[in-house]
Image (cartoon, coloured by chain):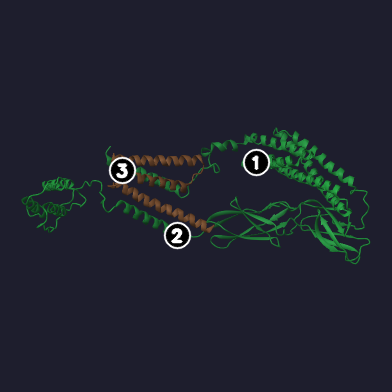
Amino acid sequence: MAGAKKYYAAAVLVVWLIIVTFFMILNRTLDLEVFFVLSLIGLLVVAVLIDGAFSRPRYMRYIGYLIVVEVAIFAYIVAEKILEIIAA
Amino acid sequence: MRPRASHIILAAAAVLLILLLAGEAVDPVLYAAENISTAAHADPSTIEKRSPGDAASVVPLMDELLGHTGTLALTIKVKDYESAERDLARYSELSSQFDRLVVKLDLSETDIAEFQKSNRQNQEALAALLNDSQRLDELKSLEIEVLDGDQRMAVIYEGEALRQKMRETYTAYANREPETARIATRYGANATPYHESVDTLGDVVGAAEEWQEGNGTSSGAPRSPLTISITPREGRYGENLTIGGTYAGGIPGTPVTIYIDSRIARNTTLDGNTTYEYPYRIGRVLAGPHLVYATAATIFSEVTTFDVLAADTNISLAVVEVNRTAVACTGNLTTEDGRPVLEAPVLLRVDGETLISTETDGNGTYARTLVLTGGEHTIRAEFNAAGYPLNSSRSQVETLQVRGEGLSPFPFIAAIAAALGAGWYIRRRGLPEEHPVQEEPDIEPPPEIAETVPSVEIEGLPPREAATLLFRALRERLGIPASKTPRECARLAPDHAAFFERYERIRYAGEVPTEEELRSMEREALGRG
């Protein structure tokens, strides 16, 4: 069961990304920034849901690294937007 | 398949995918309804609209527009101004829809665009005729109320001005009829209401003229001692006309007021020869006829007119880089014969969509500094001649490369700070103090390191505590992590399995070790056995 958790998580994440893509195409607004932010939200939710209380599997450590990288990119996007607003 | 092989294939596929994406990641091609670049990526919902055979979707709207002209003319004729205003609002809404459709379908080079232009002019003409009819009605009721001579004259003059304006508007409206009807018929739209509207409006203007003739301004009025003349009788933007006249029997210094289109244009006085003169420069007035008369105290002059002719304009644009992000746009707006157009609004269209407004100065020159983002931009200056006796003009499109500011360190600092913060948070969250993190079972056995013999003093301690101390000592000596339980220790160090199993019973089953057992355990823990 514990081993299957990470596969469920990956499947949920993929389904989430497909839903996001589907609605973006439906709305004809393909925006990489929005897609990235929504994927980060999905990843954070999945990470919280699969995180155990007493043990830390190796895949959780890797998800942690991934979250750190994505949060960094997210912060970059936010900072860019702030600069754009200030410049406008 | 062996797990190792599947992992290698997965990793190779991931690397390949990243490499393929890397080429497109910097400048991704996003397909939307607006930027269909290939037939394969065409948006099905826009194909129909873009196809040339789709003029059919325009025709119902043309039909409706023509239908509205008939209704509107009729409501103006029966003086139902409330309904007329409602009809006009609906008509202008439909016209806007039609304009959008023409742009969307890219029909600007076809005769549909000509129809659109005529339709716009018709809409303006109908709006003007509606307003003028309303005002004329007001004047009619004023005329009945006002019996005083001066005021009556003012009413009659304004009525005359309105009559001329309505006649002019109607003539232009009627002149557009053949061409507009031809286009409408060609596309199968019903032009009958439009023909009817021309006839109806003819009746409206005819009624206005009858009323004016009844007042006797056009003919039969006694000749006024205050004369008025305009030389020349027509002109273009920026040209000077001289409005002047004499006042037979007037006293030098008598104030004379000159009205253009019923609005005071100038107050002047009679000179020594009882004449007056006003040099009028044609500025921001509409092209077409304009009405002039003068008053001196209670004396009104006759009404005369002058024509303002429409002129073409030229607008230039020069773009100069100011710094890395700003560019200065300058240019001149002149008429075709080189006269500067003063204090006129100029629009700068950046990248075909963003509009920035500026204004020409007293020399017809405009200047505006724009701050742009890095990259290639196009700028074009436009003059929309609304309210001027001039035709609109556009400058050539200037393409420029803005260097843009260098990369700001702020986003990078933010990114690093966020990464550090997220890392710290995840680490802190994953390492609660009371629950040391347990790694997934480490497969590799702990290496038999050259242990240092810990010193353990168990004298005087209760037997179970002494056993715990000995367990820790042995675990430390074997280099087993402190997170391992006695059972895990037994599995990792099978040579000492008996010790760990005995300790497990002492720890968890509550057994109390004997003195002899403790000695034996001590020997094993310290490696003296």
Q: CA distance from mark 2 to mark 1?
A: 46 Å
Most extreme residue toward the left is B516
Residue B403 at least partly seen: no
Tag 2's secondary structure?
Answer: helix
The dot on residue B97 is 1
Residue B213 location, quadrant: top right
The dot on residue B410 is 2
Tag 1's secondary structure?
Answer: helix
Chain shaded brown = A
| Closer to the camera in the image, B382 or B37 | B382
Chain name for mark 2 = B
Quadrant containing the N terminus of chain B is top left
Q: CA distance from mark 1 to mark 3?
A: 60 Å
Q: Which residue is mark 3?
A: B8
Please state the horizontal and vertical placement of residue B237, each as a whole percent of the image.
Answer: 76, 56
Q: CA distance from mark 3 to mark 2?
A: 39 Å
Most extreme residue toward the bottom is B272
Chain shaded green = B
